[in-house]
Image (cartoon, rainbow, N blue to C red):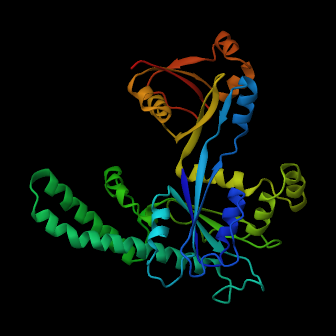
């Protein structure tokens, strides 16, 4: 999973990036006229992996991973003119964290003077809209000439694409997001290759100051495919740099339930409709990420395509049952380890062993 972090200059998005990745990227002037991308891969914290690893004592423990891409600040008024490196980093992401500033600072004044998170979110989204509009208009210009050269199903497919692109253009020109549209599954598939920024699920991160009251987020999460949360970026970055034994007392002192790293992972999984299943054994305990609703054969394919191609059955046990039984032998004895076919819908936390033949 890749998640892009985007925001206006001085919104604190690189601070958020440091909090999520335990990095120490420069924050003082990042994005001030420079086109840069920070990238870090972090392990998904999951206590279930730790417990299973303790039970099976494998040679190797592998956790799921998330890659965060932090791009330089998007300048309001740039009219979608993203640098190629920045656009590439964002287009490959599965979701976007849209960071908006809600904190005041005499040392780092807001470029527009007054702090207004709703205004900044609208300005940020407008730049994403304009970036997508450039791509859509370019495609609309080219399609008529291409259609004239085609016959049969290919011609019909591109005629349908032209109609769809015109719908996207009208939506974007009205400052709407592609994610606002209720596209059919076929339509969504047909535009997936364009990697439109406003089609991606978005999590609005309201970067508040220490001691600020909890902000009302109703204005930030009313769009389809979007949700919102608030956190204190500077404080969270400080937490991320602490030794592990100092984290819990620090959280208790400031009344923070959990570090932003854990909270953000959960929000991203929910936003993208993802879940984890596990494989266990003496060699390795491993967490795998699949979409909610994935079947047993799709889960097998996430492990290796050969397992999906030669799928026979899946041995399945729920995580809670595995913990209660203690061993696979005891699980079999209690009848908790069962065989499921390829159409079985995998549940979050399921432990799978794929039987296959190729």
In screen coordinates, is 200 left or right of 212?
Answer: left
Q: Position of residue 268 (x, y in %)?
A: 59, 53
Q: How many marks?
A: 0
Instruction: Quadrant for residue 252, please give it.
Output: bottom right
Kindly tell me whether residue 180 is visible in this rendering.
Answer: no
Residue at 46% over, 74% down: 83
Kindly tell me whether residue 90 is visible in this rendering.
Answer: yes
**Residue at the bottom extreme, as displayed:** 113
Q: Considering only vertical position in the picture, is 175 above or below 300?
A: below
Q: Considering only vertical position in the picture, is 111 above or below 124?
A: below
Q: Position of residue 81 (x, y in %)?
A: 44, 78
Residue at 70% over, 60% down: 23
Q: Considering only vertical position in the picture, is 331 above or below 266?
A: above
Instruction: Quadrant for residue 169, please give it.
Output: bottom left
**Residue at the top extreme, as displayed:** 333
Residue at 70% over, 13% down: 330
Q: Could you tell me which quadrant the C terminus lies in?
A: top left
Instruction: Quadrant for residue 25, please give it.
Output: bottom right
Q: Position of residue 24 (x, y in %)?
A: 72, 64
Q: Position of residue 176 (x, y in %)?
A: 43, 72
Q: Considering only vertical position in the picture, is 120 above or below 214?
A: below
Q: Nearer the viewer, residue 17 or 220?
A: 17
């Amino acid at each position: 999973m890749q998640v892009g972090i985007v925001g206006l200059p001085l919104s604190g998005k690189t601070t958020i990036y440091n909090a999520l990745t335990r990095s120490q990227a420069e924050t003082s002037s990042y994005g001030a006229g420079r086109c840069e991308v920070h990238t870090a891969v972090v392990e998904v914290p999951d206590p279930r992996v730790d417990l299973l690893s303790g039970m099976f004592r494998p040679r190797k423990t592998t956790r799921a991973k998330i890659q965060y891409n932090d791009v330089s600040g998007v300048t309001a008024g740039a009219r979608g003119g993203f640098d190629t490196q920045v656009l590439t980093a964002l287009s490959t992401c599965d979701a976007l964290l849209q960071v908006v500033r809600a904190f005041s600072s005499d040392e780092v004044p807001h470029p527009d003077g007054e702090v207004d998170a709703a205004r900044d979110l609208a300005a940020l989204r407008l730049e994403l809209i304009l970036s997508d509009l450039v791509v859509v208009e370019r495609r609309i210009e080219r399609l008529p000439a291409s259609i004239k050269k085609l016959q049969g199903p290919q011609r019909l497919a591109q005629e349908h694409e032209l109609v769809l692109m015109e719908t996207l253009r009208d939506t974007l020109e009205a400052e709407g997001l592609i994610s606002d549209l209720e596209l059919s599954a076929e339509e969504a598939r047909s535009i997936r290759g364009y990697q439109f920024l406003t089609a991606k699920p978005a999590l609005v991160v309201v970067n508040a100051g220490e001691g600020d009251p909890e902000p009302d987020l109703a204005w930030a999460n009313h769009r389809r495919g979007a949700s919102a949360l608030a956190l204190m970026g500077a404080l969270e970055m400080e937490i991320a740099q602490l030794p592990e034994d100092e984290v819990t007392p620090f959280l208790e002192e400031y009344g923070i339930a959990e570090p932003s790293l854990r909270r953000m992972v959960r929000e991203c999984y929910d936003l993208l409709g993802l879940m984890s299943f596990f494989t266990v054994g003496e060699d390795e305990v491993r967490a795998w990420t699949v979409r909610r609703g994935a079947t047993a054969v799709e889960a097998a394919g996430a492990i290796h395509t050969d397992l999906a191609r030669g799928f026979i059955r899946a041995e399945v046990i729920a995580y809670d049952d595995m913990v209660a039984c203690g061993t696979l032998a005891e699980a079999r004895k209690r009848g908790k380890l069962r065989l499921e076919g390829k159409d079985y819908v995998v549940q979050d936390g399921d432990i799978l062993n794929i039987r296959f033949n190729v």
